[in-house]
Image (spheres, rainbow, N blue to C red):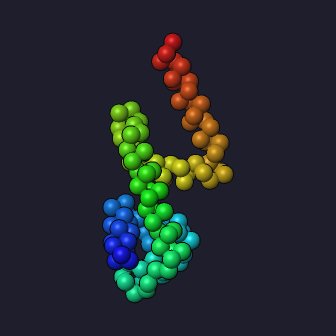
């Protein structure tokens, strides 16, 4: 069962062009721990197993939701959406986010009038 979970985590990392560092940060473990899990050099404890399962489940759900989002008929991938969220989550970038949202709203109103 553990091997199957590791395979899923490894596949998730590969398919989403993630780094061990990013996954480690998301799971609140060290990069070395993620590496040891992937290389089967270390077992996974019950708490970590639960965290990994939830992480994979949550990201699968987000990916499905993100696949439906379109920007001018151009699909926005889950990774691109996460990059936008990460960028605009930074306090220094929030003002820029509000400017973008205001432009979108103005354009939307212009198209409806």
> Which residue is located at x 43 percent, y 51 percent?
61
Q: Position of residue 15 (x, y in %)?
A: 33, 61
Q: State the residue lying farthest toward the top.
A: 113
Q: State the residue lying farthest toward the bottom.
A: 41
> Which residue is located at x 59 percent, y 30 percent?
102
Q: Position of residue 64 (x, y in %)?
A: 39, 47
Q: Is residue 91 left or right of residue 39?
A: right
Residue 98 shows up from this direction: yes
Nearest the eye: 23 or 55: 55
Residue 31 shows up from this direction: no
Tell me which corner region of the image, top left, top right, bottom left or bottom right, holds residue 25: bottom right
Q: Is residue 2 left or right of residue 93?
A: left
Q: Is residue 40 left or right of residue 112?
A: left
Nearest the eye: 3 or 81: 3
Q: Is residue 28 left or right of residue 69?
A: right
> Which residue is located at x 40 percent, y 87 percent?
41
Nearest the eye: 14 or 91: 14
> Which residue is located at x 48 percent, y 53 percent?
83
Residue 93 vertical position relative to residue 41 in the rendered view, above or below: above
Q: How many marks?
A: 0
Residue 110 vertical position relative to residue 14 in the rendered view, above or below: above
Q: Position of residue 86 (x, y in %)?
A: 54, 54
Q: Position of residue 12 (x, y in %)?
A: 36, 64
Which quadrant would the N terminus be assigned to in this image? Answer: bottom left
Tell me which corner region of the image, top left, top right, bottom left or bottom right, holds residue 8: bottom left
């Amino acid at each position: 069962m553990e091997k199957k979970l590791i395979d899923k985590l490894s596949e998730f990392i590969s398919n989403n062009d993630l780094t061990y560092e990013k996954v480690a940060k998301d799971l609140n473990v060290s990069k070395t721990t993620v590496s040891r899990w992937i290389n089967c050099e270390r077992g996974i404890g019950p708490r970590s197993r639960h965290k990994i399962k939830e992480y994979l489940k949550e990201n699968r759900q987000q990916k499905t939701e993100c696949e439906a989002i379109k920007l001018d008929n151009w699909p926005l991938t889950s990774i691109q959406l996460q990059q936008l969220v990460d960028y605009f989550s930074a306090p220094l970038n929030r003002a820029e986010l509000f400017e973008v949202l205001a432009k979108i709203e103005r354009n939307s109103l212009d198209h409806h009038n």
